[in-house]
Image (spheres, helix red, strand yellow):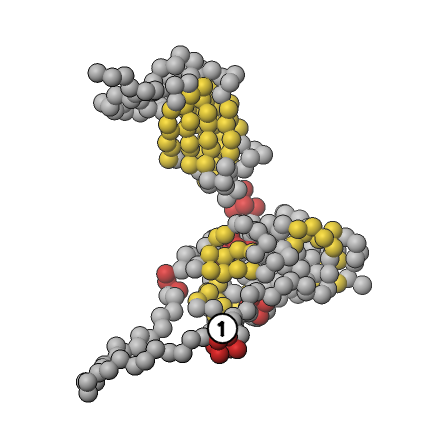
Amino acid sequence: MAERCVHKGCGKTFTDPQEECVYHPGPPIFHEGQKGWKCCKPRFLTFDEFLSILPCTTGKHSTIDDTPKPDSPPSPELSEKLPPPPNRIPTNGNVLRLPAPRAPQSASPAALSPAPPESDSDDPSIPVPPGTGCRRRGCNATSPVESPLSRGDEKCVYHPGQALFHEGSKGWTCCKRRVLEFDEFMKIEGCKGKSNHLFVGSKRKSEQEEAVSEIRHDFYQTPTSIIASLFLKKIDKDRAKVEFASPTAVLLDLPTADNKRYKTELPLFGHIDTARSTYKIMGTKLEMTLVKADGLSWSTLRSDEQRTSEIIQVGRAGRA
């Protein structure tokens, strides 16, 4: 009999209890607008990015939720151990007027980041893999193991708004209900319905790629090398290409996980040793160590940039 795994980050339907399960063993953490899992380091500001955090632990599927509870507030018994309140301040008969209390201000829906554009329906030409979850927020439906002949009997109930976390309460901007626990928040039933689920989306939108024409860069230098940083988030390490094609140019092809691509030939100010130059890809940038071929100082990174009138000195200055 097929059962549904209750591990955080999994939620798959399984029939083999020994099947591997990739999930989050820790509880969710929401602090000062940042969202993440206690068992992982990544922190994000938007709820969609929080849901996209890859699970960090491999185990077995389970129908029993063994996730530890978040840290509970201090017990009321601790109040007995607190020191007594200080003596009242004498007022000499004058009346102290306290400032009027401010009404709590909830986060305005208009101030929230807009929802990412989503396809209205699935492309019929794209096959739906078994066990694929619906992309719409609040809908926990998964595609059946066997593809049905018709999808006309589906019913998708979801939240068209954004997730809202304010002063410990959790809810959706499209609904009035608010809860305190994350598990209860995930169970809030959607408020809008559609006749079909959204499992794979539209082919055209999923394949569309945004070309990035310009990114920010910076560099510093030593007597023997240039350390250059090109700032671009979420670079796909498996598909990225950095080629030291010639002593005066670097070929860059940097696709990202959010469907962007920066592709260019970077003209260099000076000459480099292509065999000894290296690079490494980080979470927010590409860092290149360009070994100088002649040991001369560079006033800019790119040869097509405007040169400054500053004199750049490398090494220790001599005495006058």
Q: Nearer the viewer, residue 259 or 91?
A: 91
Residue lying furthest bottom in this view? 93
Q: From this view, report whether residue 4 is shown above or below residue 53.
A: below
The residue under the point 63% across, 47% down is 125
At 30% from the left and 77% from the top, the residue drawn is 101
Q: Residue at x 32, y 80 (%)?
A: 87
Asked whether the viewer can see residue 141, the reply is no
Where residue 81 appears, as percent x and y from the top left, is 48, 76
Q: Is residue 306 visible?
A: yes
Residue 8 on image: x %, y %:
63, 59
Mark 1 = which residue? Answer: 178
Q: Residues within 10 Å of mark 1 (few under 14, many from 20)?
A: some
Among the 4 quarters of the image, the one containing residue 113 = bottom left
| Quadrant of image for the N terminus | bottom right
Residue 219, relative to residue 246: is it above or below? Answer: below
Q: Nearer the viewer, residue 202 or 7?
A: 7
Where does the image place residue 51, in percent across and percent down from the top left? 55, 55
Residue 164 against residue 89 in the figure, above or below: above
Question: Secondary structure under badge 1?
Answer: strand
Total tally of numbered discs in the picture = 1
Question: Looking at the image, which residue is at 69% across and 50% down?
Answer: 58
> Which amino acid does the dot numbered 1 rest on?
Arg
In the rendering, at what x and y percent does residue 50 appear? 53, 55
- Picture quarter with the C terminus: top left
